[in-house]
Image: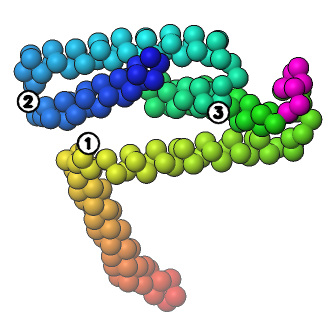
Amino acid sequence: KARKAHKMCISTMHTFWKMARKSRPASAPPDDVLRDLLQVLETNDQALAVAKTEYSVLLEKYPTSTGLHQTYAHFCDSVLNNNHSAEKHRKEARTLEGDDGDDGDDDPHEHHELHKKPGSELSYSIASSDNHRSMIAKSMTLFTDEIMGEEVHAMRVLEMRVRVGLAVLVVLAIGGFLITDLYLFSDVARRNLD
């Protein structure tokens, strides 16, 4: 039920952005489009509430499930946009995976603390976080032209105009300095020498 609600959250947000992209910002969208968008958001809110509730129940019931911690970390990243919580659950899943081969100690965290290398967990966490963030950045660059194609094009044109204007300003400033140097300063220098 938690995974179903998780998938429903992702699906409704995809539907929302797809509908929002289809309605052009130049003209105000009709009331029926706004009503549909609000309905999709309401469905998303309901699915989000169900997913949060189900995941919290499952995490209380099965605190040692590595798959559950990984799935909840993905939910935190993709739906809640909560990197801190996602990293916490990924770290917990890695800790639990490292304890699968233990000989039945009462406190699995204590046994894991004895056998880990200092700093290795932190570097793995940073690397996995960087990999996840770079993957998200790559996927965002793939969809940027679809989502904001006209705006990106307008920004590039504006950037080119600013660069050309700056280049013209620099050329005019250099030309003005050279003219001033050749005529005014050379005359002043000759008078000072005489």
Q: CA distance from mark 2 to mark 3?
A: 44 Å
Q: Could you tell me residue 30's position as x and y percent?
A: 7, 21
Residue in the picture at 8% in, 30% down: 27
User: From which residue to which does the magenta span run?
Assistant: 102-108
Residue in the picture at 32% in, 68% down: 167
Q: CA distance from mark 1 to mark 3?
A: 31 Å
For label 2, the SS is loop
Report which residue position mark 3 lands on. 90
For badge 3, the amino acid type reads: Arg
For label 3, the SS is helix
Report which residue position mark 2 lands on. 27
Residue nearest the viewer, comparing 34 with 61: 61
**Residue 158 magenta:** no
Q: Earlier in the sequence, mark 1 or mark 2?
A: 2
Q: Earlier in the sequence, mark 2 or mark 3?
A: 2
Report which residue position mark 1 lands on. 147
Q: CA distance from mark 1 to mark 2?
A: 17 Å
For badge 2, the amino acid type reads: Ser
